[in-house]
């Protein structure tokens, strides 16, 4: 997707101008941005729409990454990013953003639309291991499994290979149930 097709409020057009264009049917809102109404909403468009929230040295993860990979129609109300460099970085403080200060390995990161995003399998693993603390992750797991069916089995294999990960038992059980439902 060409950057000229993504309209962030305040950059080239103000929010009232973009809202008027949306009412006229010229643009549609996607995440924090607007795109022409006839542009296909693909992963690169979704990633670019949240690029302002993903700071240098971080990658979209959790429900944000699931949405970028095709899970669901609307973005999560609160976005998640995780550090993807070895050095420590200071997370941006925002009510709309959760910064996870654990390192996301380089092999678990893909570039989508110029934005670092956790891979689909790593995203599913993160969602599954968070499920015991936050049951709101289950709909994101289900939506990601529908969007990319092979991810559930890959995440289950990955999670079984990890040692001493908090929430791994509950995550494995949830992934096993999800895998059975998807068959």
Image (spheres, rainbow, N blue to C red):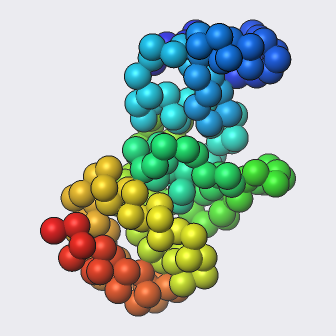
Residue nearer the viewer, 9 or 168: 9
> Which residue appears at 69% of the width and 54% of the height?
78
> Which residue appears at 41% of the width and 22% of the height?
40
Which residue, as the protein is rendered here, is positioned at the far left? 183
Place of residue 119 in the rendered image (x, y in percent of width and height, measured from the top left): 39, 52
Q: Is residue 61 left or right of residue 24?
A: left
* Image quarter (top left, top right, bottom left or bottom right) of the N terminus: top left
> Which residue appears at 69% of the width and 41% of the height?
53
Q: Is residue 37 left or right of residue 182?
A: right
- Image vertical order of residue 99 relative to residue 180, above or below: above
* Image quarter (top left, top right, bottom left or bottom right) of the C terminus: bottom left
- Image vertical order of residue 160 relative to residue 124, above or below: below
Q: Is residue 138 left or right of residue 14?
A: left
Place of residue 62 in the rendered image (x, y in percent of width and height, measured from the top left): 53, 59
Place of residue 29 in the rendered image (x, y in percent of width and height, measured from the top left): 61, 27
Place of residue 175 in the rendered image (x, y in percent of width and height, measured from the top left): 33, 76
């Amino acid at each position: 997707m060409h950057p000229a097709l993504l309209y962030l409020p305040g950059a080239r057009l103000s929010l009232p101008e973009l809202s008027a264009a949306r009412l006229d049917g010229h643009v549609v809102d996607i995440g924090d941005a607007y795109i022409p109404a006839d542009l296909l909403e693909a992963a690169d468009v979704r990633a670019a729409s949240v690029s302002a929230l993903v700071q240098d040295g971080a990658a979209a993860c959790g429900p944000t990454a699931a949405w970028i990979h095709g899970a669901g129609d609307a973005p999560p109300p609160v976005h998640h990013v995780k550090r993807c460099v070895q050095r420590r970085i200071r997370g941006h403080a925002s009510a709309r953003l959760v910064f996870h200060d654990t390192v996301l390995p380089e092999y678990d990161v893909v570039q989508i639309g110029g934005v670092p995003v956790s891979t689909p399998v790593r995203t599913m693993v993160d969602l599954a291991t968070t499920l015991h603390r936050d049951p709101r992750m289950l709909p994101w797991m289900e939506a990601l499994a529908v969007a990319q069916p092979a991810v559930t089995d890959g995440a289950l294999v990955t999670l079984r290979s990890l040692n001493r990960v908090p929430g791994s038992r509950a995550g494995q059980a949830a992934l096993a149930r999800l895998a059975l439902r998807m068959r």
